[in-house]
Structures are given as C-alpha cells and as structure tokens.
Image (spheres, rainbow, N blue to C red):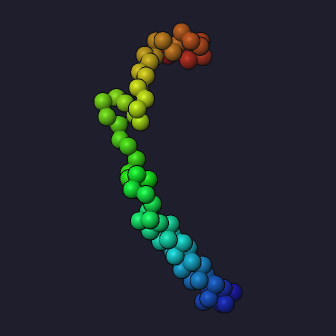
C-alpha cells in the first residue's frame, strides 16, 4: 500500500490535472466562432426560437393527470 500512496496516487492526480489543463487550453486553438461563450437569452428568444409560455389552465385541459 505504501507504493500506491507514495507513487501511483500522486501520479494519477498529476495526470488528471494535466488532462484537464489540456482540455481547457484547447479552446485557444478552436475557431473563433466555436470558442465564443454560449448565446444568452434576449427578448424571450433562446437561440433563435421563440419561447412558448403556456398557462397552467391550458395544460390541465390536455391531460386530467396535470390538473392543478
């Protein structure tokens, strides 16, 4: 067990850190449109799709199990 605690476990921690560092750093090499953050909601539209606001009374008429 001493070999695992002294050599293998620290090596695994360092390898996981290096893999995470490479994954995060890969954004530098992506095309500019892919490296941008995700679009945010503007004026009720999410990603170019209009949001549908359905009142609860309408939902209760669709299925009796959804009654409020």
Report which quarter residue 5 is drawn in: bottom right
Report the residue at 45% width, 60% height from top.
30
The vertical placement of 46 against 14, above or below, is above
Return the x and y of residue 34 as percentages of the image width and height: 44, 53
Report which quarter residue 41 is drawn in: top left
Return the x and y of residue 24 as percentages of the image width and height: 46, 66
Q: Residue furthest right?
A: 1
Return the x and y of residue 25 as percentages of the image width and height: 44, 68
Report which quarter residue 28 is drawn in: bottom left
Q: Nearer the viewer, residue 59 or 32?
A: 32
Number of numbered discs visible in the structure rendering: 0
Q: Residue furthest front?
A: 31
Report the residue at 41% width, 36% height from top.
47
The vertical placement of 4 against 23, above or below, is below
Left or right placement of residue 15 versus residue 41 in this view: right
The vertical placement of 6 against 41, above or below, is below
Q: Residue furthest left?
A: 43
Residue 54 in view here: yes
Residue 13 in view here: no
Report the residue at 56% width, 17% height from top.
66
Report the residue at 40% width, 32% height from top.
48
Return the x and y of residue 51 as percentages of the image width and height: 41, 26
Q: Nearer the viewer, residue 56 or 21?
A: 21
Q: Nearer the viewer, residue 25 or 59?
A: 25
Image quarter hosting the N terminus:
bottom right
């Amino acid at each position: 067990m001493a070999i695992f605690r002294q050599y293998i476990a620290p090596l695994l921690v360092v390898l996981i850190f290096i893999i995470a560092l490479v994954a995060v750093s890969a954004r530098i090499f992506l095309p500019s449109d892919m490296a941008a953050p995700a679009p945010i909601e503007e004026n009720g539209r999410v990603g170019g799709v209009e949001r549908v606001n359905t009142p609860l009374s309408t939902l209760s008429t669709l299925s009796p199990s959804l009654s409020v």
